[in-house]
Image: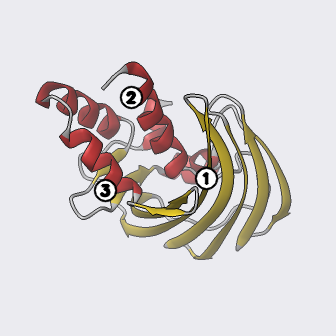
Amino acid sequence: MHRTGFCSLMAACALAFAVPGAAAQTTPSMKPGLWQIHIQREENGQNMPDGGERMKERMKKMPPEQRQRIEEMMKQRGIAPGDDGMTKVCYSRKMVEQRAWADQGGCKTDYSNRSATSWKWHSSCPQVGYEGDGEATFPDAENFVVKSSGISTIGGKTHKSNSTRTGKWLAADCGDLKPMDSSL
């Protein structure tokens, strides 16, 4: 995989598992620990394989040494693609309390609503070539749903996308998966 492809893969991972809103005053109640993330995505009007499946397929095409390095790097950053198309993410107590799980870095986000149960926003992320709108709902401390739509520019091509990311808390213990904040 060439550098541009690798950077696109890592940028997609970062956006897939973040919930925009680093500066939110009203924080939803979320449990720290191991979360399972499922992504449904549509690009340019066509359904796309979910994030975990897409990542898994890309990684299958890599030489074994490169695949192992990337899997280890992702694991060190708190992300583990699953065999079932679901991805596991580890959020530490610090991340949940300080809302670090919401930071996308390099994005400017303007909110039209922020409550303990829902957020609505518009984000502009020039570093990854993305601009769009989103809504997150937090029905309880063990679940969230993030719906977003936007336009991204990758390799000079413009893509319209819609996605739904569903998060479900699995356990307080992340096992050997390091929290995402350990790489910050």
**How far apart are labels 1 and 2 at the CA level?**
31 Å
User: Looking at the picture, does residue 39 appear above or below residue 142?
Assistant: above
Colouring:
secondary structure
Measuring from the top left, give residue 153's x and y in whole percent.
63, 36
Q: Could you tell which of marks 2 and 3 lies nearer the N-terminus?
A: 2
Identify the image quadrant of residue 112: bottom right
Foreground of the two, 121 or 53 = 53
**How far apart are labels 3 and 1 at the CA level?**
31 Å
Q: Could you tell which of marks 1 and 2 lies nearer the N-terminus?
A: 2
Crowding around mark 3 (Cα neighbors within 10 Å: few <14, some 14 to 19, many 20+) is many
- Residue, disc 1: 97
Which three-letter amino acid code belongs to the residue tagged 2? Phe
For mark 2, give the secondary structure.
Answer: helix
User: Looking at the picture, does residue 161 appear above or below residue 100?
Assistant: below
Measuring from the top left, give residue 32's x and y in whole percent.
47, 58
Identify the image quadrant of residue 140: bottom right
Crowding around mark 1 (Cα neighbors within 10 Å: few <14, some 14 to 19, many 20+) is some
Using residue 73 as the reference point, say whether residue 146 is left or right of it.
right
- Taking the spot 71% from the left edge, 31% from the top edge, the residue there is 126
Mark 3 vs mark 1: give the one in front: 3
Measuring from the top left, give residue 141's x and y in whole percent.
54, 72
Identify the image quadrant of residue 117: bottom right
- The quarter of the rendered structure image containing the N terminus is top left
Measuring from the top left, give residue 114's x and y in whole percent.
80, 64
Farthest-out residue, top = 3
- Residue, disc 3: 53
Q: Which mark is residue 6?
A: 2
Disc 3 vs disc 1: Cβ atoms closer than 8 Å?
no
Which three-letter amino acid code belongs to the residue tagged 3? Glu
Q: Could you tell which of marks 3 and 1 lies nearer the N-terminus?
A: 3
